[in-house]
Amino acid sequence: MPTYDLLIRNGAAVAEAGAGLADVAVADGAIVAVEPELAGSAREEIDATGLHVFPGVIDAHVHFNEPGRTDWEGWASGTRALAAGGGTCAFDMPLNAHPPTLDGPSFDAKRVAAEAQAVTDFALWGGLVPGSRDRLAELAERGAIGLKAFMSRSGTDDFPAADDLTLYEGMRTAASLGLIVAVHAESDVLTSRLAARAVAEGRTSGRDYLASRPVLAEVEAIQRAILFAEETGCALHVVHVSSGRGVALIAAAKACGVDVSCETCPHYLVFTEDDVERLGAVAKCAPPLRSAAEREALWRALRAGDVPMVASDHSPAPPAMKQGADFFRIWGGISGCQSLLPLLLTEGRHRRGLPLRTVASITAGFVARRFRLPCKGRIAVGADADLALVAVDEG
Protein backbone atom coordinates (compact mmCIF):
# COMPACT_ATOMS: atom_id res chain seq x y z
CA MET A 1 0.00 0.00 0.00
CA PRO A 2 1.49 3.37 -0.97
CA THR A 3 2.33 5.90 1.71
CA TYR A 4 2.06 9.60 0.89
CA ASP A 5 3.14 12.79 2.59
CA LEU A 6 -0.38 14.21 2.39
CA LEU A 7 -3.74 12.79 1.40
CA ILE A 8 -6.73 15.06 0.87
CA ARG A 9 -9.86 12.94 0.91
CA ASN A 10 -13.45 13.45 -0.21
CA GLY A 11 -13.05 16.90 -1.75
CA ALA A 12 -14.44 18.13 -5.06
CA ALA A 13 -11.36 18.72 -7.19
CA VAL A 14 -11.89 21.66 -9.56
CA ALA A 15 -10.31 21.49 -13.00
CA GLU A 16 -10.86 23.59 -16.11
CA ALA A 17 -12.97 20.73 -17.45
CA GLY A 18 -15.20 20.72 -14.37
CA ALA A 19 -15.33 19.48 -10.78
CA GLY A 20 -15.62 15.97 -9.40
CA LEU A 21 -15.12 14.10 -6.15
CA ALA A 22 -11.57 12.84 -5.85
CA ASP A 23 -8.81 12.18 -3.37
CA VAL A 24 -5.53 14.01 -3.99
CA ALA A 25 -2.24 12.44 -2.88
CA VAL A 26 0.96 14.43 -2.45
CA ALA A 27 4.59 13.33 -2.12
CA ASP A 28 7.72 15.48 -2.18
CA GLY A 29 5.71 18.59 -2.96
CA ALA A 30 4.05 17.17 -6.07
CA ILE A 31 0.69 15.60 -6.85
CA VAL A 32 1.20 11.87 -7.36
CA ALA A 33 -2.39 10.61 -7.60
CA VAL A 34 -5.87 12.01 -8.19
CA GLU A 35 -8.56 9.36 -7.94
CA PRO A 36 -11.82 8.64 -6.14
CA GLU A 37 -11.29 6.67 -2.91
CA LEU A 38 -7.52 6.34 -3.13
CA ALA A 39 -6.03 3.40 -1.26
CA GLY A 40 -3.08 3.93 1.04
CA SER A 41 -2.16 6.13 3.95
CA ALA A 42 -0.26 9.34 4.54
CA ARG A 43 1.67 11.08 7.26
CA GLU A 44 -1.06 13.73 7.19
CA GLU A 45 -4.65 13.38 6.05
CA ILE A 46 -7.24 16.10 5.50
CA ASP A 47 -10.92 15.33 5.30
CA ALA A 48 -12.20 17.77 2.68
CA THR A 49 -15.81 16.60 2.78
CA GLY A 50 -17.99 19.49 1.67
CA LEU A 51 -15.03 21.46 0.34
CA HIS A 52 -13.76 22.20 -3.15
CA VAL A 53 -10.08 21.73 -3.93
CA PHE A 54 -8.87 24.45 -6.31
CA PRO A 55 -5.48 24.84 -7.90
CA GLY A 56 -3.78 27.55 -5.85
CA VAL A 57 -4.25 31.08 -7.12
CA ILE A 58 -1.37 32.41 -9.21
CA ASP A 59 -1.55 36.17 -8.76
CA ALA A 60 0.43 37.56 -11.69
CA HIS A 61 0.38 41.17 -10.52
CA VAL A 62 1.42 42.21 -7.00
CA HIS A 63 3.59 44.93 -5.47
CA PHE A 64 5.31 43.70 -2.32
CA ASN A 65 7.84 46.59 -2.27
CA GLU A 66 10.79 44.76 -0.76
CA PRO A 67 13.66 45.54 -0.62
CA GLY A 68 13.67 49.26 0.02
CA ARG A 69 10.06 50.01 0.93
CA THR A 70 9.26 47.14 3.27
CA ASP A 71 7.30 49.52 5.52
CA TRP A 72 4.72 49.75 2.70
CA GLU A 73 4.49 45.96 2.80
CA GLY A 74 7.10 43.26 2.40
CA TRP A 75 7.27 39.64 1.37
CA ALA A 76 6.35 38.29 4.82
CA SER A 77 2.98 39.98 5.23
CA GLY A 78 2.22 40.13 1.49
CA THR A 79 2.60 36.41 0.87
CA ARG A 80 0.73 35.58 4.07
CA ALA A 81 -2.20 37.63 2.84
CA LEU A 82 -1.96 35.86 -0.51
CA ALA A 83 -1.99 32.45 1.17
CA ALA A 84 -4.94 33.41 3.38
CA GLY A 85 -6.94 34.05 0.21
CA GLY A 86 -6.03 30.75 -1.46
CA GLY A 87 -2.94 31.98 -3.30
CA THR A 88 0.19 29.88 -3.71
CA CYS A 89 2.29 31.95 -6.13
CA ALA A 90 2.72 35.65 -6.88
CA PHE A 91 4.54 37.57 -9.60
CA ASP A 92 6.05 40.70 -8.07
CA MET A 93 6.25 43.86 -10.15
CA PRO A 94 9.60 45.64 -10.59
CA LEU A 95 8.66 49.08 -9.25
CA ASN A 96 8.00 50.22 -5.65
CA ALA A 97 10.96 48.19 -4.45
CA HIS A 98 14.07 50.34 -4.12
CA PRO A 99 16.05 49.99 -6.22
CA PRO A 100 13.55 48.87 -8.84
CA THR A 101 14.22 45.55 -10.57
CA LEU A 102 15.99 46.79 -13.70
CA ASP A 103 19.18 44.72 -13.91
CA GLY A 104 20.97 41.65 -12.57
CA PRO A 105 22.05 43.04 -9.17
CA SER A 106 18.61 44.47 -8.33
CA PHE A 107 16.97 41.20 -9.38
CA ASP A 108 19.39 39.28 -7.14
CA ALA A 109 18.67 41.56 -4.19
CA LYS A 110 14.92 41.11 -4.53
CA ARG A 111 15.28 37.35 -4.88
CA VAL A 112 17.32 37.18 -1.66
CA ALA A 113 14.65 39.20 0.17
CA ALA A 114 11.85 37.01 -1.18
CA GLU A 115 13.60 33.73 -0.38
CA ALA A 116 14.13 34.90 3.20
CA GLN A 117 10.54 35.97 3.88
CA ALA A 118 8.00 34.58 1.39
CA VAL A 119 5.70 31.76 2.50
CA THR A 120 4.45 31.09 -1.06
CA ASP A 121 6.15 30.55 -4.39
CA PHE A 122 7.03 33.65 -6.37
CA ALA A 123 8.34 34.96 -9.65
CA LEU A 124 9.83 38.37 -10.41
CA TRP A 125 9.03 40.82 -13.17
CA GLY A 126 11.87 42.90 -14.56
CA GLY A 127 11.46 46.50 -15.66
CA LEU A 128 11.59 48.16 -19.06
CA VAL A 129 12.39 51.87 -18.70
CA PRO A 130 14.38 54.39 -20.74
CA GLY A 131 18.03 53.37 -20.78
CA SER A 132 17.51 49.81 -19.54
CA ARG A 133 17.53 47.92 -22.84
CA ASP A 134 21.15 46.83 -22.49
CA ARG A 135 20.38 45.21 -19.12
CA LEU A 136 17.38 43.14 -20.20
CA ALA A 137 19.49 40.07 -20.97
CA GLU A 138 20.61 40.04 -17.32
CA LEU A 139 16.98 39.73 -16.26
CA ALA A 140 16.27 37.00 -18.80
CA GLU A 141 19.30 35.00 -17.65
CA ARG A 142 18.03 35.09 -14.08
CA GLY A 143 14.58 33.83 -14.97
CA ALA A 144 12.46 36.99 -14.96
CA ILE A 145 8.85 36.06 -15.67
CA GLY A 146 8.64 39.01 -18.07
CA LEU A 147 9.20 42.75 -18.41
CA LYS A 148 6.90 45.52 -17.19
CA ALA A 149 6.64 48.94 -18.84
CA PHE A 150 4.52 51.95 -17.97
CA MET A 151 3.04 53.94 -20.84
CA SER A 152 2.17 56.69 -18.35
CA ARG A 153 3.78 57.87 -15.13
CA SER A 154 4.27 55.10 -12.60
CA GLY A 155 4.01 57.16 -9.44
CA THR A 156 7.61 56.47 -8.41
CA ASP A 157 10.47 58.67 -9.62
CA ASP A 158 12.92 55.79 -10.07
CA PHE A 159 10.67 53.94 -12.54
CA PRO A 160 10.01 56.37 -15.42
CA ALA A 161 7.48 55.79 -18.17
CA ALA A 162 8.62 54.15 -21.39
CA ASP A 163 8.41 56.52 -24.35
CA ASP A 164 7.41 55.05 -27.70
CA LEU A 165 10.98 54.40 -28.85
CA THR A 166 11.88 52.74 -25.54
CA LEU A 167 8.81 50.52 -25.74
CA TYR A 168 9.31 49.62 -29.40
CA GLU A 169 13.01 48.82 -29.10
CA GLY A 170 12.48 47.12 -25.74
CA MET A 171 9.82 44.87 -27.26
CA ARG A 172 12.18 43.99 -30.08
CA THR A 173 14.86 42.99 -27.56
CA ALA A 174 12.32 41.14 -25.40
CA ALA A 175 11.19 39.12 -28.42
CA SER A 176 14.78 38.04 -29.06
CA LEU A 177 15.11 37.00 -25.40
CA GLY A 178 11.79 35.15 -25.33
CA LEU A 179 10.31 37.48 -22.70
CA ILE A 180 6.73 38.69 -22.54
CA VAL A 181 6.22 42.43 -22.07
CA ALA A 182 3.45 43.65 -19.78
CA VAL A 183 2.22 47.22 -20.16
CA HIS A 184 0.33 49.64 -18.00
CA ALA A 185 -1.67 51.04 -20.90
CA GLU A 186 -2.71 54.66 -20.40
CA SER A 187 -1.68 57.56 -22.64
CA ASP A 188 0.74 59.75 -20.72
CA VAL A 189 0.02 62.74 -22.95
CA LEU A 190 -3.70 62.59 -22.18
CA THR A 191 -3.52 61.71 -18.49
CA SER A 192 -0.70 64.06 -17.50
CA ARG A 193 -2.10 67.08 -19.34
CA LEU A 194 -5.64 66.55 -18.14
CA ALA A 195 -4.36 66.16 -14.59
CA ALA A 196 -2.19 69.29 -14.83
CA ARG A 197 -5.12 71.32 -16.13
CA ALA A 198 -7.42 70.12 -13.35
CA VAL A 199 -4.88 70.88 -10.64
CA ALA A 200 -4.13 74.32 -12.10
CA GLU A 201 -7.83 75.11 -11.98
CA GLY A 202 -8.17 73.88 -8.40
CA ARG A 203 -10.25 70.84 -9.35
CA THR A 204 -8.75 68.09 -7.14
CA SER A 205 -11.71 65.93 -6.06
CA GLY A 206 -12.16 62.24 -6.70
CA ARG A 207 -14.44 62.99 -9.65
CA ASP A 208 -11.82 65.33 -11.09
CA TYR A 209 -9.23 62.58 -10.86
CA LEU A 210 -11.55 60.15 -12.66
CA ALA A 211 -12.10 62.68 -15.44
CA SER A 212 -8.35 63.04 -15.93
CA ARG A 213 -7.97 59.35 -16.83
CA PRO A 214 -10.75 58.63 -19.36
CA VAL A 215 -11.34 55.30 -21.09
CA LEU A 216 -9.95 56.94 -24.22
CA ALA A 217 -6.51 57.11 -22.59
CA GLU A 218 -6.57 53.35 -22.02
CA VAL A 219 -7.90 52.52 -25.47
CA GLU A 220 -5.32 54.69 -27.27
CA ALA A 221 -2.42 53.15 -25.35
CA ILE A 222 -3.64 49.61 -25.93
CA GLN A 223 -3.84 50.26 -29.67
CA ARG A 224 -0.27 51.54 -29.67
CA ALA A 225 1.07 48.63 -27.63
CA ILE A 226 -0.62 46.12 -29.92
CA LEU A 227 0.89 47.81 -32.98
CA PHE A 228 4.38 47.62 -31.48
CA ALA A 229 3.88 43.97 -30.46
CA GLU A 230 2.69 43.04 -33.94
CA GLU A 231 5.63 44.85 -35.55
CA THR A 232 8.27 43.29 -33.27
CA GLY A 233 6.78 39.82 -32.78
CA CYS A 234 6.86 40.36 -29.02
CA ALA A 235 4.41 38.60 -26.71
CA LEU A 236 2.28 41.29 -25.06
CA HIS A 237 0.25 41.27 -21.86
CA VAL A 238 -1.96 44.23 -20.97
CA VAL A 239 -2.37 44.56 -17.22
CA HIS A 240 -5.45 45.73 -15.30
CA VAL A 241 -7.73 46.43 -18.27
CA SER A 242 -10.65 48.47 -16.96
CA SER A 243 -12.91 48.89 -19.99
CA GLY A 244 -14.89 46.79 -22.39
CA ARG A 245 -13.51 48.74 -25.34
CA GLY A 246 -9.99 47.91 -24.23
CA VAL A 247 -10.79 44.21 -24.04
CA ALA A 248 -12.43 44.30 -27.47
CA LEU A 249 -9.26 45.70 -29.04
CA ILE A 250 -7.17 42.94 -27.48
CA ALA A 251 -9.61 40.21 -28.55
CA ALA A 252 -9.63 41.52 -32.12
CA ALA A 253 -5.83 41.64 -32.27
CA LYS A 254 -5.57 38.12 -30.89
CA ALA A 255 -8.03 36.90 -33.53
CA CYS A 256 -5.71 38.41 -36.16
CA GLY A 257 -2.71 36.48 -34.85
CA VAL A 258 -1.08 38.94 -32.44
CA ASP A 259 0.37 37.21 -29.37
CA VAL A 260 -1.52 39.31 -26.82
CA SER A 261 -3.39 38.62 -23.59
CA CYS A 262 -4.87 40.71 -20.83
CA GLU A 263 -6.06 40.69 -17.24
CA THR A 264 -8.58 42.63 -15.24
CA CYS A 265 -8.76 43.03 -11.46
CA PRO A 266 -11.40 42.29 -8.83
CA HIS A 267 -11.93 45.97 -8.05
CA TYR A 268 -13.03 46.67 -11.63
CA LEU A 269 -15.49 43.78 -11.40
CA VAL A 270 -16.97 44.83 -8.06
CA PHE A 271 -16.78 48.62 -7.72
CA THR A 272 -17.71 51.56 -9.95
CA GLU A 273 -16.80 55.22 -10.12
CA ASP A 274 -19.63 55.99 -7.70
CA ASP A 275 -17.75 54.03 -5.06
CA VAL A 276 -14.85 56.46 -5.32
CA GLU A 277 -17.10 59.16 -3.85
CA ARG A 278 -18.47 56.75 -1.25
CA LEU A 279 -15.16 55.18 -0.18
CA GLY A 280 -12.74 58.01 -0.87
CA ALA A 281 -8.98 57.60 -1.13
CA VAL A 282 -8.98 53.86 -0.43
CA ALA A 283 -10.65 53.39 -3.84
CA LYS A 284 -8.10 55.37 -5.84
CA CYS A 285 -6.25 53.34 -8.47
CA ALA A 286 -4.97 53.70 -12.02
CA PRO A 287 -6.64 53.11 -14.36
CA PRO A 288 -9.50 54.37 -12.19
CA LEU A 289 -12.75 52.66 -11.37
CA ARG A 290 -15.19 52.99 -14.24
CA SER A 291 -18.93 53.23 -14.83
CA ALA A 292 -21.41 50.47 -14.10
CA ALA A 293 -21.70 49.91 -17.87
CA GLU A 294 -17.95 49.26 -18.14
CA ARG A 295 -18.12 46.88 -15.20
CA GLU A 296 -20.84 44.88 -16.91
CA ALA A 297 -18.85 44.84 -20.14
CA LEU A 298 -15.93 43.30 -18.26
CA TRP A 299 -18.16 40.57 -16.83
CA ARG A 300 -19.45 39.75 -20.32
CA ALA A 301 -15.90 39.57 -21.61
CA LEU A 302 -14.88 37.36 -18.69
CA ARG A 303 -17.68 34.89 -19.41
CA ALA A 304 -16.86 34.94 -23.14
CA GLY A 305 -13.20 34.17 -22.49
CA ASP A 306 -11.93 37.48 -23.86
CA VAL A 307 -10.55 38.30 -20.40
CA PRO A 308 -8.69 35.05 -19.67
CA MET A 309 -7.24 35.92 -16.26
CA VAL A 310 -7.77 38.04 -13.17
CA ALA A 311 -4.96 39.47 -11.03
CA SER A 312 -5.15 41.62 -7.93
CA ASP A 313 -2.72 44.48 -8.70
CA HIS A 314 -2.15 44.41 -4.94
CA SER A 315 -0.59 47.81 -4.24
CA PRO A 316 -0.30 48.74 -0.55
CA ALA A 317 1.05 51.95 0.94
CA PRO A 318 1.39 53.48 4.42
CA PRO A 319 -1.94 54.90 5.67
CA ALA A 320 -0.67 58.47 5.51
CA MET A 321 -0.24 58.14 1.76
CA LYS A 322 -3.95 57.33 1.35
CA GLN A 323 -5.16 60.54 2.99
CA GLY A 324 -5.58 64.15 1.96
CA ALA A 325 -7.91 66.62 0.30
CA ASP A 326 -6.07 66.64 -3.05
CA PHE A 327 -7.03 63.38 -4.77
CA PHE A 328 -4.20 63.74 -7.28
CA ARG A 329 -1.58 63.59 -4.50
CA ILE A 330 -3.01 60.47 -2.84
CA TRP A 331 -1.28 57.18 -3.58
CA GLY A 332 -3.14 55.19 -6.19
CA GLY A 333 -3.35 51.54 -5.25
CA ILE A 334 -5.77 48.95 -3.86
CA SER A 335 -4.63 46.06 -1.68
CA GLY A 336 -6.42 42.94 -2.88
CA CYS A 337 -4.37 39.75 -3.11
CA GLN A 338 -6.19 38.19 -0.14
CA SER A 339 -9.64 38.91 -1.57
CA LEU A 340 -9.13 37.93 -5.24
CA LEU A 341 -10.54 34.40 -5.04
CA PRO A 342 -13.24 35.16 -2.42
CA LEU A 343 -14.59 38.03 -4.54
CA LEU A 344 -14.67 35.90 -7.69
CA LEU A 345 -16.61 33.25 -5.81
CA THR A 346 -19.07 35.59 -4.11
CA GLU A 347 -19.65 38.06 -6.93
CA GLY A 348 -18.86 35.75 -9.83
CA ARG A 349 -20.06 32.32 -8.75
CA HIS A 350 -22.95 33.14 -6.42
CA ARG A 351 -24.39 36.29 -7.97
CA ARG A 352 -23.50 35.86 -11.63
CA GLY A 353 -23.31 32.10 -12.14
CA LEU A 354 -19.66 31.99 -13.16
CA PRO A 355 -18.74 28.29 -13.43
CA LEU A 356 -16.16 26.98 -10.98
CA ARG A 357 -14.10 25.68 -13.88
CA THR A 358 -13.87 29.25 -15.17
CA VAL A 359 -12.75 30.49 -11.76
CA ALA A 360 -10.00 27.84 -11.76
CA SER A 361 -8.90 28.88 -15.23
CA ILE A 362 -8.79 32.65 -14.72
CA THR A 363 -6.96 32.38 -11.39
CA ALA A 364 -4.56 29.53 -12.15
CA GLY A 365 -4.83 27.41 -15.29
CA PHE A 366 -4.52 30.09 -17.95
CA VAL A 367 -1.98 32.04 -15.91
CA ALA A 368 0.33 29.02 -15.73
CA ARG A 369 0.07 28.42 -19.48
CA ARG A 370 0.54 32.03 -20.49
CA PHE A 371 3.66 32.41 -18.38
CA ARG A 372 5.06 28.96 -19.17
CA LEU A 373 4.83 27.32 -15.76
CA PRO A 374 3.97 23.73 -16.75
CA CYS A 375 3.97 22.37 -13.20
CA LYS A 376 1.48 24.90 -11.87
CA GLY A 377 -2.17 25.83 -12.26
CA ARG A 378 -3.73 22.37 -12.36
CA ILE A 379 -4.68 19.41 -10.20
CA ALA A 380 -2.97 16.59 -12.06
CA VAL A 381 -0.27 14.00 -11.51
CA GLY A 382 3.13 15.63 -11.79
CA ALA A 383 1.94 19.15 -11.00
CA ASP A 384 3.14 21.05 -7.96
CA ALA A 385 0.89 20.47 -4.96
CA ASP A 386 -0.32 24.08 -4.93
CA LEU A 387 -3.84 23.69 -3.62
CA ALA A 388 -6.56 25.73 -1.95
CA LEU A 389 -9.41 24.18 0.01
CA VAL A 390 -12.51 26.33 -0.28
CA ALA A 391 -15.96 26.17 1.26
CA VAL A 392 -18.11 27.05 -1.74
CA ASP A 393 -21.62 27.93 -0.69
CA GLU A 394 -23.85 26.25 -3.24
CA GLY A 395 -26.86 28.15 -1.96
Image (cartoon, helix red, strand yellow):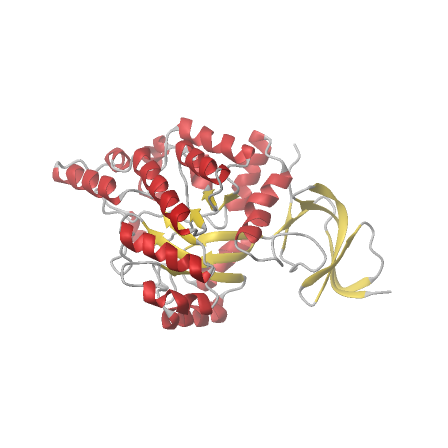
> Residue at 43% across / 51% down in the picture?
233
> Residue at 17% across / 42% down in the picture?
196
Splitting the image into 4 quarters, where does residue 283 fall? top left
Q: Pick out the residue farthest to the top.
A: 293
Q: Position of residue 87 (x, y in %)?
A: 55, 53
Asked whether the viewer can see residue 358, the reply is yes
Position of residue 121 in the picture relative to residue 69 (left or right):
right
Q: Which of the two residues, 135 or 342, is positioned nearer the viewer here?
A: 135
User: In which quadrant will I find the C terminus?
Assistant: top right
> Residue at 72% across / 50% down in the picture?
48
Number of numbered discs overlaid on the protein picture: 0
- Image height check: is 336 above or below 173? above
Q: Pick out the residue farthest to the left.
A: 200
> Residue at 17% across / 35% down in the picture?
203
Position of residue 213 in the picture relative to residue 347 (left or right):
left
- Image height check: is 356 above or below 94? above
User: In which quadrant will I find the N terminus?
Assistant: bottom right
Position of residue 269 in the picture relative to residue 154 (left or right):
right
- Image height check: is 121 above or below 296? below
Q: Which of the two residues, 237 or 239, is positioned nearer the viewer here?
A: 237
Asked whether the viewer can see residue 64, the reply is no
Q: Position of residue 263 (x, y in %)?
A: 46, 44
Q: Which of the two residues, 84 or 301, is positioned nearer the viewer here?
A: 301
Q: Position of residue 360 (x, y in %)?
A: 61, 45
Q: Position of residue 394 (x, y in %)?
A: 66, 35
Q: Pick out the residue farthest to the front.
A: 231
Splitting the image into 4 quarters, where does residue 293 fall? top left
